[in-house]
Image (tube, coloured by chain):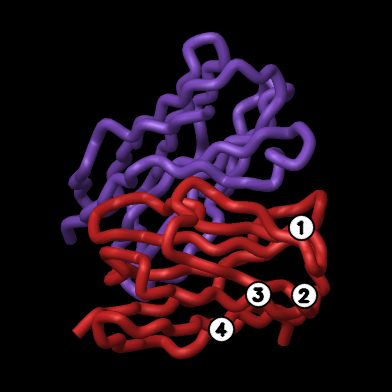
Chain colours: A red, B purple
Amino acid sequence: DGGITQSPKYLFRKEGQNVTLSCEQNLNHDAMYWYRQDPGQGLRLIYYSQIVNDFQKGDIAEGYSVSREKKESFPLTVTSAQKNPTAFYLCASKEVIGEAFFGQGTRLTVV
Amino acid sequence: AQTVTQSQPEMSVQEAETVTLSCTYDTSESDYYLFWYKQPPSRQMILVIRQEAYKQQNATENRFSVNFQKAAKSFSLKISDSQLGDAAMYFCAYRSAFGAAGNKLTFGGGTRVLVKP
């Protein structure tokens, strides 16, 4: 079945560590996105990529990094520079003309 | 930059009745898309309905319909014949129709819908 897979579902990080969240899609979509969701709030855009080997910062990119080496994959690294990383992270993809499809998310907790 | 505002943090509705969720947005663009997404406890984002700004006719999807007022920059969602499965967070979202910015969704803060049996 076509879709977006995020892993892991739950992730725990010690302070000062970098962690990488995985996002894979088999929908052949060109564009991919990372959003952050804090409790009781809407989604805020971290990074997005419209084509392989190219990506742009969103509204809250500080403390995060991404790569887009393959069309199917758009991993997000939460670095130690992100001061408050505990949140729910959602990945999405879409065609140029079409609607966004979302993964099931990764809950990141700093311990 | 575009902004989306949902002024109702929580709404409660009796099963089988109707509830209306409010959304306002701010933009200087003439062409854009508006969406309502549902996020149930599973946290999966589900597209409920979409409206294209150049279409005057309000979108409808089964029990879900919108009231799109372009001049007022208002985009409300009406859920008719509410069911227990409608209980979720609902997010209003905006997307420009132009250029690279046209691919990004801007979300409101969400409205939690509670359905009473």
Q: Nearer the viewer, mark 2 or mark 3?
A: 3
Q: Amino acid at mark 1?
A: Gln
Q: Amino acid at mark 2?
A: Leu
Q: Which mark is residue B6?
A: none
Residue B72: x and y in percent read 48, 12
Q: Residue at x 52, y 29 (%)?
A: B2
Q: Quadrant of residue B50?
A: top right
Determine which residue is flagged by label 1: A50
Q: Nearer the viewer, residue A95 or B85?
A: A95
Label 1 resides on the chain identified as: A
Nearer the N terminus, badge 2 or badge 3? 2
Nearer the N terminus, badge 3 or badge 4? 4
Determine which residue is flagged by label 4: A22
| Callout 3 and callout 4 share a chain | yes
The mark tally for this picture is 4
> Mark 4 to mark 2: distance in Å?
16 Å
Q: Amino acid at mark 4?
A: Ser
The local secondary structure at tag 3 comes to loop
Residue B64 appears anywhere in the view:
no
Label 2 resides on the chain identified as: A
Looking at the rendered image, the quarter that the C terminus of chain B falls into is bottom left
> Mark 3 to mark 4: distance in Å?
7 Å
The local secondary structure at tag 4 comes to strand
The crowd level at tag 2 (other Cα within 10 Å; few <14, some 14-19, many 20+) is some
Nearer the N terminus, badge 2 or badge 1? 2
Q: Which mark is residue A27?
A: 2
Nearer the N terminus, badge 1 or badge 4? 4
> Mark 2 to mark 3: distance in Å?
13 Å
The crowd level at tag 1 (other Cα within 10 Å; few <14, some 14-19, many 20+) is many
> Mark 1 to mark 3: distance in Å?
11 Å
Q: Nearer the viewer, mark 2 or mark 1?
A: 1
